[in-house]
Structure formats: C-alpha cells, structure tokens
Image: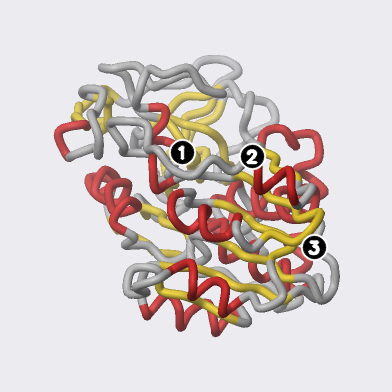
C-alpha cells in the first residue's frame, strides 16, 4: 500500500538538478465520503514549473519546500465514495506528483476514453493546446497571407501554434534547437524552419526567412531570437508573449535591447497572457481542437518517459531540449488498481 511521492527538496539557484527533488514513500490514502482515490497514469512536465520552484511573486503560488510538487496529471478513479465519479473514470486535473492521490472531485475533468489518446488531454487537448489556441487566435489573430513566427516551435505549444496558423492561411516560420526538430516542423507544414543552435547569425536567418516582415509573433523563448524578430515587425504586428524559457534558469536578469521604441514605431501590440485567463472558454477550445485532430488537420507529437521515478529527469530534460512536442511521463496503465 505504498505511495511514492516527489517533493521539492530545495529552491534551485539557476538550473534545477536532481538534488532539487526528494522521493518519499508515503502510505496510500483511503477515500472517505465524497472522495475518490486516483491512480496516476500520465504526468505532464512543463517549463512554467521552474518558476514555481522559486519564491518570487507570480501568477500562481510557489511550490513549498518539503511538500509534493504538483502539475497536470491524467489519473483513473480506483476507489470511489463520490456520487458522480465512478471507479474506472479517467480524469485530468492539477494533482501532486504521487502514485496515488485523494480528491473531492473539485478541479477534476472527466475525459473520454473512446476518442483521442487520453494523454492528449495533457497536450494538444489540454493546457498546451489551449495555450496555442487562445494565444494565436485571440491575440495574434493571423490573417491569410500574413507571416507568423513561432519560437520554440517544436514544443508542445509551438507545434500547435504553427499548425493553427497554417489552418488560417498564414505563412509560418519556426525556430527550434536541432536538425531533427527542423525536419519535424517541415513535416507539420511550416514554410521555413531554423535551427538556432547551428545558425551563426539568427537575425540574418530570420530576415531571409521573412522577406515581407513579421505580422504575428508567438514568443515561447525570449532572448536573442525575440530581439531579432522585433527588428522585422510590420506595422500593426501582434505579439503573444507566452513564455521566456531562455531566461528561466538565469541567476541574474539578462540585459538586452529595449523593445519599446520598435513597438512604438510599428504600432505593434505586445500582450502577455496566461491560459487560465481563458478558463471560461476552455470547452470552446477543446471542442475546436478536437475537431481539427479528428479531421487530420492537427497532428501532435509526444515524447514519453517511462516510470514514476523518471519524472525529475523528464522535467530537467525540458531545459536541454530533449522533447519534441509534449513531454510526458507514463506512470501506469489504466484499469489496474
């Protein structure tokens, strides 16, 4: 009746290491009235979690040292004293990094098991897909024939952004960190893809790839790539600021060009956003994304790591660019207590 749990051992300085995490074997809980016992099937590892490991003020509270880390999880109800969640129900929610967890049902969303893979509800039909959907379509609003640039384009969010932009008739340019990822972006229909790690002059490469300038920029990365894109903005360009993974492990605030003058001269709009801003519209996003998946217009790559004990390694791999598409840890098969 053990229940392995992963805790935040200490707040990292710079890049997290294996010592950032601590494993603890706890007793498997028993549900009381109104509760369910959930067995973890898939765990999502995401770059935003790095921010929660520090104690800086942010849009969500930080993880507590000595307490379980939590994030997106697909789980199965294996014991139930809840009137609406029967044994065998598969759900997604924000849950602790534990093999088993208790819930009163709040914040859980049942997911169908007779459609797309259930892991998709942590990816293209979950937080990353919804981030791409609302960030691109509500903020960038690409028009047919416009040029859209996506940084971190081979990741869980960026790969969906690029495909949605193509669905809307845009010309799409993506940046990624390996030749394999560049080839993957071409398979997805990106018009141009750039390996920023092997490109000696990223500014020139982006200028060559965007001869008519940039109308929309979906920024997952920040840093030198973003600095270069700002020099290519067209009048009334729209920028969706989604992530800044290039700076997440920085111990000092990086100093770079100040963008305000470029935004002013081009009358461009820069909007930061968090996907939870659109929580009331999540059903709309899931419905539209599901339709495109079922129509074959939207494909999705998943990078799986096997085993509960590999969750920290999968998380650390995000910052080495080890994943293409969504990084997930498969913990268990469904229908097994």
Residue under label 1: 48
Mark earlier in primary sequence (3, 2): 3
How many marks the image carries: the answer is 3
Mark earlier in primary sequence (1, 3): 1
Mark earlier in primary sequence (2, 1): 1
Residue at point 32%, 46% (across, down): 315
Mark 1 to mark 3 CA distance (whole Å)? 26 Å
Residue 251 appears in view: yes
Determine which quarter of the picture holds residue 7: top left
Asked which colour scheme the image uses, the reply is: secondary structure
Describe residue 311's horizontal placement relative to residue 238 as left or right: left
Q: Is mark 1 on a helix, strand or loop?
A: helix
Residue under label 3: 142
Depth check: 200 or 322 in front? 200
Picture coordinates of residue 192 (x, y %)? 57, 80
Quadrant position of the C terminus in the picture: top left
Residue at point 66%, 48% (across, down): 262
Residue at point 39%, 48% (across, down): 246
Residue under label 2: 260
Mark 3 to mark 2 CA distance (whole Å)? 22 Å
Query: How many residues crowd around disc 2 within 10 Å: few (fewer than 14), some, or many (20 or more)?
Result: few
Picture coordinates of residue 257 (x, y %)? 49, 44
Picture coordinates of residue 95 (x, y %)? 47, 31
Q: Nearer the viewer's eye, disc 3 or disc 2? A: 2
Residue at point 75%, 69% (across, down): 292
């Amino acid at each position: 009746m053990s229940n392995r749990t992963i805790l935040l051992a200490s707040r990292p300085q710079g890049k997290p290491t294996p010592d950032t995490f601590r494993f603890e074997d706890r007793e498997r809980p028993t549900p009381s009235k109104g509760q369910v016992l959930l067995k973890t099937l898939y765990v999502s590892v995401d770059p935003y979690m790095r921010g929660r490991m520090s104690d800086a003020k942010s849009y969500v509270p930080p993880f507590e040292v000595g307490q379980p880390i939590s994030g997106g999880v697909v789980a199965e109800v294996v014991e139930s004293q809840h009137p609406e969640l029967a044994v065998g129900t598969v759900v997604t929610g924000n849950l602790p990094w534990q093999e088993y967890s208790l819930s009163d049902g709040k914040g859980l969303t049942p997911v169908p098991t007779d459609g797309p893979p259930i892991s998709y509800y942590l990816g293209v039909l979950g937080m990353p897909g919804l981030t791409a959907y609302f960030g691109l379509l509500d903020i960038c609003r690409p028009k047919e024939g416009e040029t859209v640039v996506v940084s971190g384009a081979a990741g869980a969010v960026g790969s969906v952004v690029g495909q949605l932009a193509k669905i809307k008739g845009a010309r799409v340019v993506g940046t990624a960190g390996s030749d394999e990822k560049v080839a993957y972006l071409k398979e997805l229909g990106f018009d141009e893809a750039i390996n920023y790690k092997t490109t000696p002059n990223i500014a020139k490469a982006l200028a060559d790839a965007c001869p008519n300038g940039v109308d929309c920029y979906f920024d997952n990365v920040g840093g030198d790539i973003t600095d270069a894109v700002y020099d290519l903005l067209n009048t009334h360009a729209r920028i969706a600021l989604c992530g800044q993974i290039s700076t997440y492990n920085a111990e000092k605030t990086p100093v770079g060009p100040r963008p305000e003058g470029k935004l002013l001269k081009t009358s461009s709009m820069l909007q930061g956003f968090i996907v939870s801003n659109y929580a009331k519209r999540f059903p709309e996003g899931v419905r539209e994304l599901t339709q495109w998946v079922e129509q074959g217009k939207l494909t999705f790559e998943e990078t799986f790591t096997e085993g509960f004990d590999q969750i920290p390694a999968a998380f650390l791999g995000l910052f080495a660019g080890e994943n293409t598409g969504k990084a997930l840890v498969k913990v268990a098969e469904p229908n097994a207590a």
